[in-house]
């Protein structure tokens, strides 16, 4: 479900670019900047933040105090930002090597995870690997840290601590693997993205369109259209609003730091300016959202902001598709 809109966008945009043209040097500038100035720095930050989160979780497991518990929660929120900003370029190895679902599958399979954690069987690293991806990654860890009425460190069971130990290590390993898959002369960045600049531009625009549409229709629409807080991502931590801000920051980063904005402006300045304005407006509106949206589904002021934001996001996604057809 999570990637369906992005995949649709990729197909539509790639098809529209088959007959596209443009200066190859300019296109190469875009593909190179996408790898060197966008993807690799972002995945490096994700790797470092995942290492910090894992360390915080190990500290909690080895010394379960309220202080280490609180620090683990803070570390989760910090690491979460470094992932959410990358969702615009969650293609390539993120999809084909399953790093995306291993890191960020949702919604959480609360039935499976709860049954496993509440079992009389001792939780081990093998137990984690036997769980579905919807019981691991950021959201599995979030469920244990923030959900299950675990307000005090004393509330954590031995199985929950064992889960956090294995899940933290698994998260760090997947973040490291994603960075490695893009890196070096044999990595995806060099062998695929830089090697085919025209397709790289299609993928950037597809990623932008997919992320914009997913936030509008999935992350916000799913909850506000049905008045169901269970549809919100990061619902246990109340981090949904922050997730959305960093999703849109990722779109803006891909658009600007990849030099695609410059390249597109030279081909169709009007559409490029429109897209830039729409991205900026969506970020402005997203920053007005409360971090926790769980109790805001019927709040008229929040609903008004969400409606405006979804409209701008949808328009921006449509502009990205239109711009692709002009390049």
Image (cartoon, rainbow, N blue to C red):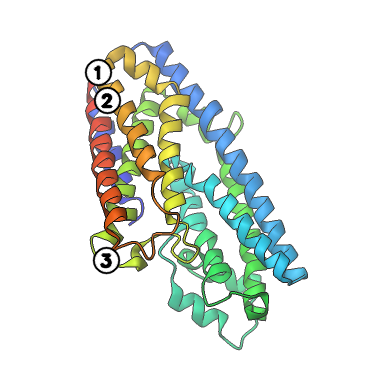
Q: CA distance from mark 3 to mark 2?
A: 32 Å
Q: Position of residue 250 (x, y in %)?
A: 45, 38
Find disc 1 in the rendering and name its residue.
270
Which one is in front in this view, the residue at disc 3 or the one at disc 1?
A: 3
Find disc 2 in the rendering and name its residue.
274
Residue 275 vs 291, above or below: the answer is above
SS type, badge 3:
loop
- Residues under numbered marks 2 and 1 in contact, where contact means CB atoms less than 8 Å apart: yes
Q: CA distance from mark 2 to mark 1?
A: 6 Å
The residue located at (58%, 75%) in the rendering is 150
- Residues under numbered marks 3 and 1 in contact, where contact means CB atoms less than 8 Å apart: no
Q: Earlier in the sequence, mark 3 or mark 1?
A: 3
Mark 3 surroundings within 10 Å by alpha-carbon count, few (fewer than 14), some (14 through 19), many (20 or more): some
Q: Position of residue 152 (x, y in %)?
A: 64, 75
Q: Position of residue 128 (x, y in %)?
A: 58, 70
Residue 223 visible within the image: yes
Q: For this view, does 297 lie left or right of residue 167? A: left
The residue located at (30%, 32%) in the rendering is 278
Image quadrant in which the N terminus is located? bottom left
The residue located at (46%, 17%) in the rendering is 29
Find disc 3 in the rendering and name its residue.
227
Specify the farthest residue to the right. 63
Mark 1 surroundings within 10 Å by alpha-carbon count, few (fewer than 14), some (14 through 19), many (20 or more): few
């Amino acid at each position: 479900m999570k990637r369906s809109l992005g995949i649709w966008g990729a197909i539509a945009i790639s098809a529209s670019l088959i007959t596209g043209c443009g200066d190859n040097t300019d296109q190469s500038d875009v593909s190179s900047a996408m790898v060197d100035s966008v993807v690799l720095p972002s995945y490096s930050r994700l790797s470092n933040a995942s290492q910090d989160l894992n360390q915080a979780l190990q500290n909690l497991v080895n010394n379960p105090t309220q202080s280490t518990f609180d620090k683990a929660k803070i570390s989760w929120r910090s690491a979460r930002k470094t992932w959410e900003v990358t969702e615009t370029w969650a293609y390539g190895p993120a999809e084909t090597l399953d790093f995306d679902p291993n890191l960020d599958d949702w919604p959480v399979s609360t039935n499976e995870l709860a049954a496993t954690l509440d079992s009389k069987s001792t939780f081990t690293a093998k137990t984690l690997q036997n769980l579905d991806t919807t019981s691991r990654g950021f959201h599995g860890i979030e469920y244990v840290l923030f959900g299950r009425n675990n307000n005090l460190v004393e509330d954590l069971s031995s199985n929950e601590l064992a889960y956090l130990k294995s899940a933290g290590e698994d998260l760090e390993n997947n973040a490291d693997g994603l960075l490695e898959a893009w890196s070096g002369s044999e990595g995806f960045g060099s062998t695929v993205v830089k090697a085919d600049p025209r397709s790289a531009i299609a993928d950037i625009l597809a990623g932008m369109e997919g992320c914009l549409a997913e936030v509008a229709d999935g992350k916000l629409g799913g909850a506000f259209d049905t008045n169901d807080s269970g549809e919100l991502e990061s619902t246990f931590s109340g981090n949904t609003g922050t997730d959305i801000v960093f999703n849109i920051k990722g779109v803006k980063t891909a658009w600007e730091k990849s030099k695609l904005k410059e390249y597109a402006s030279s081909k169709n300045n009007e559409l490029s300016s429109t897209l830039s304005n729409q991205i900026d407006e969506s970020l402005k509106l997203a920053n007005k959202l409360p971090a926790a949206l769980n109790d805001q589904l019927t709040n008229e002021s929040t609903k008004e902001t969400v409606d405006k934001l979804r409209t701008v996001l949808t328009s921006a996604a449509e502009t990205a598709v239109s711009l692709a057809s002009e390049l």
